Image (cartoon, grey):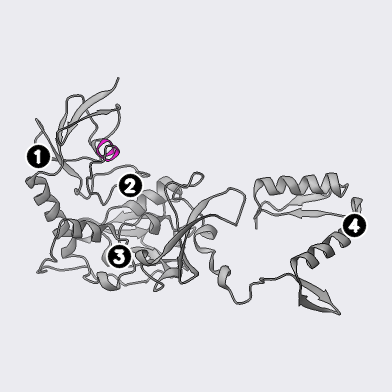
Amino acid sequence: MPITLTIDGKTIQAREGQTVLEVARANGIRIPTLCYHADLSPVGACRLCVVEVEKMRGLVASCTLPVADGMVVHTHTPRIIEERKFVLEMLLTDHPNDCMICEADGGCELQDAVYEYQVEWPQHKGKRHSYPVGADPNPFIFTDFNKCILCTRCVRACAEVQGRYVWGVANRGFNNKIVAGADVTMLEAACEQCGACAAYCPTGALTDKPSRGKGRAYQFTKVRTTCPYCGVGCQFDLNVRDGRVVKVTSARDAGVNGMALCVKGRYGYEFIHHPDRLTKPLIKKNGTFVEASWDEALDLVVEKLAQHRGDAFAFLASARALNEENYLFQKFTRAVMGTNNIDHCARL
């Protein structure tokens, strides 16, 4: 049975089990968030999404509040705006004031919220955290927990999306912090370097090492493509600047994988511009490889294959090819070359 509620004077139909935040966003009503992500279980930790509900006491986190029939919700009253400003001010009291040189500049959700609500940097009078920057020795993920807002999106992404449970929360109160395993390095905590934690992080606490210093989010042109590493068909966005791929970012609307990627898909792109990469076919002449045209190379392949038909021929298929391409490989091997000698390594 549909549920009818009112949000900011607008009568809206919703489904049982939806939250106020989900219904508001589905109907074009903006409610800011930091700890919330549509892929992850809601925790209501950051309190930025609070709303007022008539006949309910206090402000309520909309990301964890289920809709109810007849509910009347207000999302931008003076009281709510004041509360959101207070939340942002508290986050800034223990946050480095270095947006201009932060790797997440232009793509930071905290920065966006502070700008939206015009929150000035508070005059800090208490103690601050001073965690070592970039201390984790892993090859792909840069850590700066001075910029962490304890939203736990990295913790939930690692557990709920990747199923690795590398990240957790240690200590209590002001000493709360995100740790890998029992406060060890990421690799010691069995991290697979998929980069999901950095992809879901709303600030500059977790960023991608290979792309550091190569530009800001607003400087990149994004080009959607399919991962070349296996036949699953994951898609992601190549971030291009000045004609060079400098970063890979995942996207929720990728049909096969959503935000999830493996270490190869997210970080294995630097071969594209490697100086040793072959860009033209090579044919061995007089014991030396020389550049050739594609027509010349393919003609040579046809000529050589014709000399080894039947069981003198074998084909090793590739895990980096699409499923459809591997199907064609086995058809070619059996129907054209006349042999069942085909195998597949099922990995790289």
Task: Report if the CB atoms under discs 4 and 1 are less than 8 Å apart.
Answer: no
Kind of element beneath mark 3: helix
**Looking at the rendering, in which quadrant would you find the C terminus?**
bottom right
Q: Are marks 2 and 4 in contact (CB under 8 Å)?
A: no
Q: Do the residues bearing badges 4 and 3 touch, measured as CB atoms within 8 Å?
A: no
Residue at point 34%, 44% (across, down): 38
Which dot, 2 or 3, sits closer to the camera?
2
Q: Position of residue 178 (x, y in %)?
A: 31, 58
Which numbered dot is residue 142?
none
Q: CA distance from mark 4 to mark 3?
A: 61 Å
Mark 2 lies on a secondary structure that is loop
Q: CA distance from mark 2 to mark 3?
A: 20 Å
Label 2 or label 3, whichever comes before in sequence order: 2
Disc 4 secondary structure class: loop
Magenta segment boundaries in residue numbering: 22-26
Which residue carries the number 3 mark?
A: 145
* Mark toward the start of the polypeptide (1 vs 3): 1
Q: Which residue is mark 2?
A: 37
**Image quadrant assignment for residue 200:** bottom left
Measure the alpha-carbon separation of dots 4 and 1. 80 Å
Residue 41 versus residue 122 in the image, above or below: above
Q: Is residue 46 above or below residue 91?
A: above
- Expressed as whole percent of the image width and height from the top left, the position of residue 167 reads 37, 55
Q: Mark 1: which amino acid? A: Gly
Are the residues at dot 1 and dot 3 in contact (C-beta closer than 8 Å)? no
Residue occupying image coordinates x 20% and y 24%: 69
Q: Main secondary structure of the magenta part?
A: helix
- On the image, the x and y values in percent for residue 155 come to 36, 52
- Nearer the observer: mark 2 or 4; the answer is 4
- According to the image, label 4 marks what residue? 306
Q: Disc 1 designates what residue?
A: 58
Name the front one of labels 4 and 1: 4
